[in-house]
Image: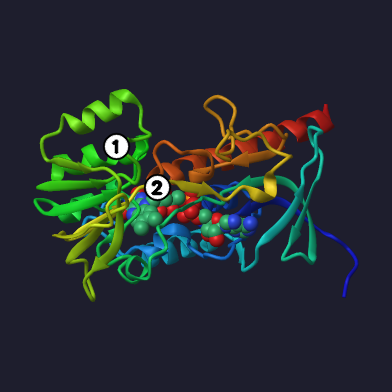
Amino acid sequence: MSDTIERIKCLIIGSGPAGYTAAIYAARADLKPIMYTGMEPGGQLTTTTEVDNFPGYPEGIDGPTMMVQLQQQAERFGTQVRIGMVTAVEFSEVHGGIHKITVDNTTQLEAETVIISTGATAKYLGLPSEQKLRGGGVSACAVCDGFFYKGQDVAIVGAGDTAAEEATYLANICKNVTMLVRKDQMRASKAMQHRVTATKNINVRYNTEVDEVLGDMVVEGLRMKNNQTGEKEEIAITGLFIAIGHKPNTDIFKGQLKMDNTGYLITEGKSTKTNKPGVFASGDVQDKEYRQAVTAAGTGCMAALDAERYLVSIESEVTA
Ligand SMILES: Cc1cc2nc3c(=O)[nH]c(=O)nc-3n(C[C@H](O)[C@H](O)[C@H](O)COP(=O)(O)OP(=O)(O)OC[C@H]3O[C@@H](n4cnc5c(N)ncnc54)[C@H](O)[C@@H]3O)c2cc1C
């Protein structure tokens, strides 16, 4: 075994739409990108059967197929895709400095630039019936999947601003929306609460939790439980949306990169620059606002362009 540590020009962490788009642009700019896929090769879209809103697919496409195609496109230009998890990082503070990376707790690497595209993980309730019906009517993304329930009765779980926003989004498309709020009030801002309560086809149920999602292959109903009285009630629905938050995958960057109070990476202005020179962030890991494949892809493109310009700036300093 060689003792020489591999030096990478452009390391991409994560294999969702942001990572693959960054890889396509970085490879075409001759940055010879190397990507580590993490535990979920292809990212969040591999957990969904239908992607209807990504431009360029007039008939829609299933998530896993779309991600294989993105991988093939990135590989066509020379991206090396490796299975592995980045487990530790030591980012340089210096412009032009080298970043130290550990993969799978064993392999050491050095990188001139790093593009972080580690995404965010949607939180679920954890009920067996909910897990069984993920992709069969249980979804963590109303903007992505609401359309499939047009004119139907659905329910949404959550009490924050995102849940309130998604409830009103669903109310525009669906017939009736039942909103389950665990406490006796919502956490959402007063303005958002008002929007929800003023929407005629949203029925807010306070002190209410999911007892069981009903249905074998697809969602057919919901058994709710009032956590004050213990009373249970069943309603017929075809879609259940879980809007109880996301966890950005940023644990390994703690103490090194600037994050907001929920762990999302903070980037500089309109760029993808983090607070460490040569380290860029794209996709859901730095975006709690939009969280869509196309927006992730857009910032992946930006990150590759930012990395390329950063490397050019270093080269011109050296030759000046
Ligand atoms: C059920 C569902 C349906 C959806 N449907 C749609 C839709 O129809 N249309 C749409 O536009 N959006 C949809 N979305 C949202 C979309 O999936 C995300 O916005 C998008 O995938 C974000 O892309 P990303 O590249 O930022 O991150 P992700 O797709 O989250 O990918 C993150 C990647 O990082 C990797 N990773 C994490 N940690 C590490 C590490 N330490 N080392 C190496 N790799 C790591 C993971 O393995 C993964 O490959 C849906 C989301 C869900 C959950």
> Does residue 13 sit above or below 134 in this rendering?
above
The local crowd at label 1, few if under 14, some if 14 to 19, many if 20 or more residues have their Cα within 10 Å, is: many
- Closer-to-camera residue (214/15): 214
User: In percent of the image, x 29 and y 23: which residue is there?
Assistant: 191
Classify residue 65 by image quadrant.
bottom left
Q: Can residue 56 be seen in this view?
A: no
Left or right of 51 on screen, residue 298: right
Left or right of 206 on screen, residue 74: right
Rendering coords of residue 169 (x, y %):
22, 39
The local crowd at label 2, few if under 14, some if 14 to 19, many if 20 or more residues have their Cα within 10 Å, is: some
Q: Is residue 157 visible?
A: yes
User: In percent of the image, x 68 and y 40: which residue is there?
Assistant: 279
Which quadrant of the rendered structure holds the C terminus?
top right
User: In percent of the image, x 72 and y 66: which residue is there?
Assistant: 104
The label number, if any, that marks residue 91 in the structure image? none
The count of marks equals 2
Kind of residue at disc 2: Ile
Left or right of 114 on screen, residue 271: left
> Does residue 41 sit above or below 231 in this rendering?
below
Circle 2 SS class: loop
- Give the Cα distance between marks 2 and 1: 11 Å
Circle 1 SS class: helix
Kind of residue at disc 1: Ala
Residue under circle 1? 164
Residue under circle 2? 244
- Closer-to-camera residue (242/46): 242
